Amino acid sequence: MSTFADETAADLPVKDMVLNLSHFVTGTPQDTSVGQNARARQDIARVSREELEDRYLRLHDDNLLLKQNNNTQEDKIKRLATKLVKLVKDRRRLERLATGEAVGNGARPGGRVRDLEMEEMMEELHEKVRGLQAENERLKQRLLVAKQQVQVQSRRPSPYRQVQSRVDTGRRRAREDSPSPSLLEEARAEIRNLENVTESLRGQLEELERDSDLLRDQLRRKETEHREALLQLQQHHTDGHRSTVHSNSAMIRLQKQLAERAAALTLLEGRFLQLQESLKAMKASHQALLDKVEELTGQLKGERLKSLGLENQLHNSNFSQIRTEEFQVRIGDLEKERDLLKENCDKLVNRSRNTNQKLTEDNKRLQIRFLEQKQQLEKLNERLAFYTTESDSGAGELSEALMLIRARKARQSGDLSFLERVEEERPTDTQSSVWELRAAHAETIQELEKTRGLLLIQSKINNNYQGELDALTRKMERDKTEYEVKLQHLAKLLDSRAAKVQKLQVQLKDAAYGTKHHVFRPDGEDEAGRLAGETEVRLERGENVLELHLGRAALSPSAPGSLFCTYGFYDAELHATPVVVADSGGGPDFDFTSRYVVRMDDRFMEYLHAGSLSVELHRAEGLGFRTLAAGQLGLRQLLEGDGEASGTLQLVGEQDIRTTTFPERMGSNTVGGLYRQWTLFHERLRVSRFCSPFCWIL
């Protein structure tokens, strides 16, 4: 294909082509603005052709991109518009369904799905048609460009084409190298192809339009059916709506009651949460007390173990004391034995001394006799020597002399034989007995020394034991006294803890369950009235009765007429006294008593503590009334006494009544006493403020 087959190969810009095309199509004269732009065209003519072509191609590409982006954005906008329309329609239908115009049955949801599918198919077909129309427009523009090129090329060539004109008319000069005749044929072939394509697209468009007409007809039928169903449903809904109108009023009343009950329930929940928090705090404090009691029990067990140890030590000390006493008895026995041994030793010493003296005396006596006999022997020997030396007697005489001497010696030896026996027997027995006695005496002395040492050691040990025993006894007595004091202190602490725990349990029970179930009867009621039960007030758990009595009023002289009082107590309804006509002599005597059944909770106690009762005096004027005076009655005095208070209330008016006073009496016939409830309230406040697991000081 030739390079001039594309529309971008044209010499002129798109805007100029459109202008020239409008001239060819409409046949109108050239616009006068062309002459005005001659100077701008002269400036353009000074630029080289290649640069102009480059600029043109770049601008053309940018223009095409912008057109494509514009087309895509328009398509997106159209799609979004259709989706928005669909969403709006769906929303309207859903709103109609929500308001009750359409109640779903078994056959309609399927038709609704089919309608959506048809609408989506129609939307896709519309998008295809719009795409084909855009393609057709683009092909038509190319066809016009091709026709313009053909017309430009079919012009007659000018003989002065080579001569440059001095005046620039604004027209583009044709390219010198004219295209070949094949370009026209190609353009015609392309035009024919485009016409064939447009014909086929027209056929498809007609088919799509026929399909869209069929779908529109089906959609109309569906819509008519849907309208009929909607009308039926609306009729059914109106019938149902009429039937539900009557129930709505009852439902509104029930909703109001439900709102009131919900408000009361929220109040009860708040109170329950407060009670639960106080219960948790009390449980925590109770747990802390139990832990402390366990700790004290552990300490008590430790003290008991210590006391058992001390008792064991005391028992051991008693045992050692018994052993000491046994040792002392043995020491006494040993001392007695020692005394006996001393006596025996003294006796033996005395006996040995006596025997020694006797033996020494006998020895001395025997020595004296021995010396005497020795002297006699010496005398005899001297005489014998004398006889032998001086006389020479014969052997007979000598033998006779010897025989005489022997006889004499025999007599002497017979007389001194006991000495030999004493010398042979007694010295040996006495010496051995003396040695035995000395050995026994030495052994006795050694035994006595050993016994004395043992006794000294034992006495020292006994003294040490006695000192330790005395120290242990003193320590045991001291520990015993400390233990008794500590036991008394722990017993007091346990009693106080038990009292506190019992008190907290009573508070918790009062807070959780309130007072007992009670039937209240006024004091001044007779027996018949009590039996009739007309004025009995049955009190639930935690409820009490409070009475308010208004007596005679003292008014200023400028306030005659029919008078009555109104007052509102706590959250009860407004009470009004009967209408009383004021006397000329004194004020009106209302003598009216109001009785309120109240629940003795923290809120009511706070109201009594800080709140007041508003009392207003009115004068009846026909069907209306006029407020004359008002005053505030403090309720704190109920808490300061025994549940009953009386006094005078000052009412101050604005115009003609300056001061109005009348006595009033308040009484509280409470179960358990109002003062007790106030005390419990204070205790609960104190517990809620200061009760914690670490608030007990031990």
Image (cartoon, rainbow, N blue to C red):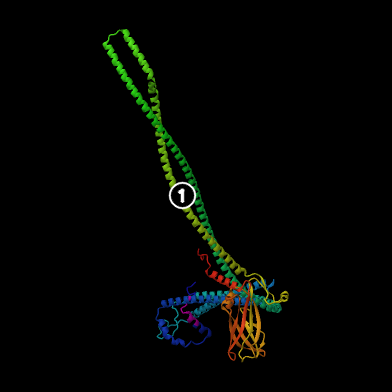
The magenta segment is: 8-18
Residue 542 picture quarter: bottom right
Q: Residue 537's x, y, as percent? A: 68, 75
- Identify the residue position indicated by label 1 in the image: 469
- Which of the pair 225/54 is nearer the observer? 225
**Where 468 sits versus 624, above or below?**
above
Structural crowding at the residue carrying mark 1, measured as other residues with C-alpha within 10 Å and reported as few (<14), some (14–19) or many (≥20) = many
- Which of the pair 154/85 is nearer the observer? 85
Q: Residue 439's x, y, as percent? A: 40, 32
Q: Is residue 317 among the parts visible in the rendering?
A: yes
Q: Main secondary structure of the magenta part?
A: helix
Residue 9 part of the magenta-drawn span: yes
Q: Is residue 199 among the parts visible in the rendering?
A: no
Q: Going 40% across and 28% down the picture, which residue do you hit?
A: 433
Residue 375 picture quarter: top left
**Left or right: where 578 falls relative to 428:** right
- Which of the pair 17/247 is nearer the observer? 247
Residue furthest left as drawn: 390
**Where 482 sits versus 79, above or below?**
above
Q: How many marks?
A: 1
